[in-house]
Structures are given as C-alpha cells and as structure tokens.
Image: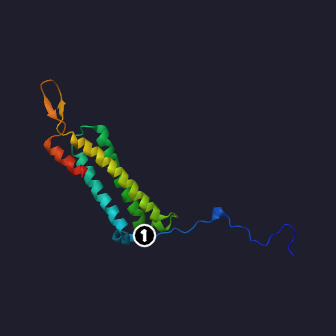
Amino acid sequence: MLPRGASSMPPPPNPAAYFPPPRVTLPSGLEILRTYSGAVIFLEILFGTIVWILVASTRVPLPLLQGWVMFVAVTAWFLSIVFLCVFLFGYANRIAVNWNQTDFLFHGATFVFYFGAFLLQAATTSLHHLPRKFNSTTQEKILADHEYNISIAASV
C-alpha cells in the first residue's frame, strides 16, 4: 500500500528543462549546396546582387517605388547569406527549430517580396514614354533608352 497522498505515477518532466532535438533533414556544411534549397539560396544571392546593381545604376524617377525594390533586394540578399551560413557552419544542428518548415517559409516569403518588387519595378519601367517637364521649353523622358533597358533587366 502506498503512503497517503502518494501516487503510482512518476512526476511529469519539467517542461522548462526539456528541449527537443532539432529536426534537420537538410545537410550541414558544403553538402547544403548540393540540395535544391541550397541551390535556391545561391540563386537568390546571385539574382539579388544583380537586381541591386541594376537598380542602383539607373536614375531613380520614382523614389518610393524603386526604394522598395532596393529594400527588398538588399534585405533578401542579406537574409539569404545569413540563412546559408546557418547551414554552412552547422548552426542548424544546434538550434531547435523545424528547419524544413523554416526553409519553406523563408523561400515563400522571399518569393512574395520579390514578386511585389517585380511589380513595382515593372510599373516604373512602363512609364518610359511619359515626358518629364523641367520647364515649358524642355521635355525629357522619365527613363532614357539605356536606363529603360537596365530597368527591364532589373524587372526580369
């Protein structure tokens, strides 16, 4: 017979002291570059750099629109490098996060932001033929022909 107030069940574990091991099916180190996720991160870094350079090399006719495009390109470029470094240096094995879900959400959010930036850059590019009036005698296009071509490349 058990003493009064005692139970046959062991006490529950302290939830504050228990951390489940991270579930990582993506490899760490240089092996990440051989997966689809690593290839997508590498392409995000590459194309983010190209967009950053192309938008920065043109005159900015609409600062609000192209400012958001630059913000998305620079922020996604930086976060992609950080995300890649988490796997390259093995930090994914030390942090208890569902990395498969995090990877999916990261690429999904990056897609949404890049798609929005594409729409804004395409809207800026579509204004190529509208004149910009400096005074009553001088008219100039919003984007010169060379800048128009660069803006098309940045949109794509």
Q: Residue furthest bottom?
A: 1
Pick the quarter of the image with the N terminus.
Answer: bottom right
Residue 46, x across and y down, in percent: 28, 59
Q: How many marks?
A: 1
Q: Amino acid at mark 1?
A: Leu
SS at mark 1 in the image = loop
Residue furthest toward the left?
137
Residue sticking out furthest to the top: 136
Label 1 packing within 10 angstroms: few (<14), some (14-19), many (20+): some
Please state which of residues 52 and 111 is positioned toward the viewer in this rendering.
Answer: 111
Q: In the rendered image, which residue does mark 1 sit on?
A: 26
In the displayed structure image, the side of residue 109 where residue 144 appears, left or right: left
Residue at figure coordinates x 18%, y 40% from the top left: 128
Q: Tell me where residue 143 appears, x and y as whole percent.
A: 18, 39
The percent position of residue 127, horizontal first and vertical second, equals 21, 39
Decide if residue 140 is on the left or right side of residue 99. left
**How is the rendered protein coloured?**
rainbow
Question: Seen in the image, is 21 located left or right of residue 136?
Answer: right
Which residue is rendered at x = 25% and y = 45% of the image?
122
Taking the spot 34% from the left edge, 69% from the top edge, the residue there is 33
* Above or below for 80 versus 118: below
Establish if 39 lies above or below 110: below
- The spot of residue 16 in percent (x, y) is 64, 61
Residue 101 falls left or right of residue 156: right
Q: Which residue occupies the foreground of this view, 64 or 88? A: 64
Q: Is residue 13 above or below residue 70?
A: below
